[in-house]
């Protein structure tokens, strides 16, 4: 496969949607640009939707460019306009806690090699009248109304605070251009109006030229964004979304999306991705592409050890070799399954019916005689078996599987 230029690779990976700056391709290929990507601290963790942008920023860093990651302590106090309604205002205390959590996540992903800034640092002493005089007079109201995200909210209504967001983000770009030699912004495509406002301010106030490109928003197989507002957030914080949960989601990636995700989320070379997809096409049931996607993302976010742990939990649960797992790993792997408490020894058929594993003794007997009930990986078919602490893992856990996929967790 012919070696691509930096720009050609970005386009091959599907990371370029809107572009500003005529010679941006030359800059990406031959210069060392300082660029920025920003997010508002609306939660105490970033999610997989953010990670798609962070991977692009990290990719640019590997190409020799200098990243600035902005956490919006100022913009987060207002909230970026959403297509349908105003964002909920969060307390300053919560906002600051979120910033600290997000800074740590970004720092880990970039191995402390990226500059991290907070736009509240340059807004906290900026007088409102000075801001209107210095910045507001350069942006025409008709220009703002014409931006897509603003235009879509006019019928339902938009507050002045939300409306002002575009000016504030535009000023961020101007400020970093003037003080940090930042000449390019890289964001998701929903930020295009805010980006071009910053480019206009740089041109009108400094007579300078700035660049930008946006990335298409990454959607799941149902056409939804990866975000908490969509109800499908996969958090980057390991305490909110475990490596195992992330692993399960990624190995179940729809075949129609796997090539896109490998291009966007991994640092595999184009030739590696093409070879992997050729193998996947021949034997899709082995899910080699999905497993590699999981390996790349979990290793980058958490560690190689966390990836191995997630894989081992998954394989042990699938194969029924529960006894090979530690108690803590079982609790991680079965966090979402129905669970119940056991206070004393109990006959097996009563355990199955009393805890709604089977709907009746008749169903329980059918399951038992067809060898469809396993406890801690061992088949049980005698309804009169007495279930005690002694057979529990660490005298605590009973992992009960009904059929091939339904799990239940009993805890002594």
Image (spheres, helix red, strand yellow):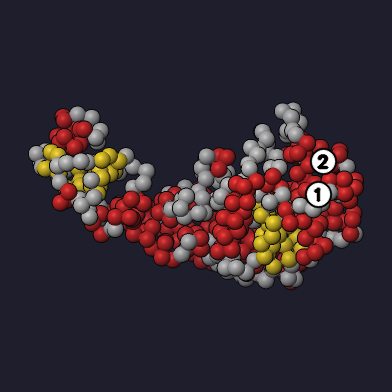
Residue 63: quarter of image: bottom right
Q: CA distance from mark 2 to mark 1?
A: 8 Å
Q: Count residues near mark 2 (Cα–Cα under 10 Å), then give few for <14, some for 14-19, many for 20+.
A: some
Find numbered disc 1 in the image and state the secondary structure of the residue it sits on.
helix
- CB within 8 Å, label 2 to label 1: yes
Which residue occupies the foreground of this view, 80 or 362? 80
Label 2 sits on residue:
144
Identify the residue at horizontal 57%, vertical 55% (top origin).
101
* Label number found at residue 391: none
Identify the residue at horizontal 74%, vertical 29% (top origin).
157
Residue 109: quarter of image: bottom right
Which quadrant holds the N terminus?
A: bottom right
* Label number found at residue 197: 1
Find numbered disc 2 in the image and state the secondary structure of the residue it sits on.
helix
Q: Count residues near mark 1 (Cα–Cα under 10 Å), then give few for <14, some for 14-19, many for 20+.
A: many
> Where is residue 141 shown, x and y percent of the image?
86, 39
> Where is residue 174 shown, x and y percent of the image?
81, 57
- In the shown orientation, is residue 95 left or right of residue 257? right
Identify the residue at horizontal 40%, vertical 54% (top origin).
244
Which of marks 1 and 2 precedes in the sequence?
2
Q: Is there any visible trace of residue 51 in the rendered image?
A: no
Residue 270: quarter of image: bottom right
Identify the residue at horizontal 14%, vertical 39% (top origin).
346
């Amino acid at each position: 496969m012919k070696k691509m230029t930096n720009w050609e690779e970005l386009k091959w990976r599907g990371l370029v949607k809107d572009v500003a700056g005529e010679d941006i391709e030359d800059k990406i290929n031959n210069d060392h640009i300082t660029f920025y990507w920003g997010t508002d601290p609306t939660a105490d963790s970033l999610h997989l939707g953010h990670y798609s942008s962070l991977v692009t920023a990290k990719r640019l860093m590997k190409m020799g460019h200098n990243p600035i990651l902005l956490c919006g302590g100022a913009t987060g106090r207002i909230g970026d306009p959403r297509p349908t309604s105003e964002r909920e205002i969060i307390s300053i205390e919560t906002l600051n806690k979120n910033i600290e959590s997000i800074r740590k996540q970004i720092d880990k992903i970039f191995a402390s090699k990226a500059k991290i800034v907070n736009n509240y640092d340059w807004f906290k002493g900026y007088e409102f009248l000075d801001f209107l005089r210095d910045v507001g007079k350069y942006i025409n109201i008709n220009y703002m109304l014409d931006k897509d995200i603003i235009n879509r909210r006019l019928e339902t209504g938009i507050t002045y605070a939300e409306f002002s967001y575009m000016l504030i983000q535009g000023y961020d770009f101007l400020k970093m251009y003037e003080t940090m030699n930042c000449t390019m912004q890289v964001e998701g495509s929903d930020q295009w109006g805010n980006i071009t406002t910053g480019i206009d301010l740089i041109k009108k106030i400094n007579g300078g030229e700035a660049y930008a490109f946006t990335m298409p928003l990454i959607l799941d197989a149902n056409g939804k964004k990866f975000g908490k507002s969509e109800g499908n957030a996969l958090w980057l914080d390991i305490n909110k979304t475990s490596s195992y949960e992330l692993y399960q989601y990624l190995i179940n990636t729809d075949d129609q999306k796997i090539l896109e995700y490998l291009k966007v989320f991994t640092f595999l070379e184009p030739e590696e991705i093409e070879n992997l997809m050729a193998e996947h096409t021949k034997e899709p049931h082995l899910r080699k592409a999905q497993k590699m996607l999981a390996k790349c993302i979990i290793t980058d976010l958490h560690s190689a050890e966390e990836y191995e742990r997630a894989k081992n939990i998954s394989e042990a649960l699938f194969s029924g070799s529960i006894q090979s797992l530690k108690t803590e790993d079982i609790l991680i792997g079965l966090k979402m399954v129905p669970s119940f408490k056991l206070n004393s020894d109990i006959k097996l058929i009563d355990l199955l019916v009393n805890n709604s594993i089977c709907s009746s003794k008749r169903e329980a007997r059918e399951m038992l005689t067809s060898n469809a009930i396993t406890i801690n990986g061992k088949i049980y078919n005698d309804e009169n078996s007495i279930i005690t602490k002694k057979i529990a893992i660490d005298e605590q856990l009973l992992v009960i599987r009904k059929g091939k996929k339904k799990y239940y967790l009993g805890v002594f």
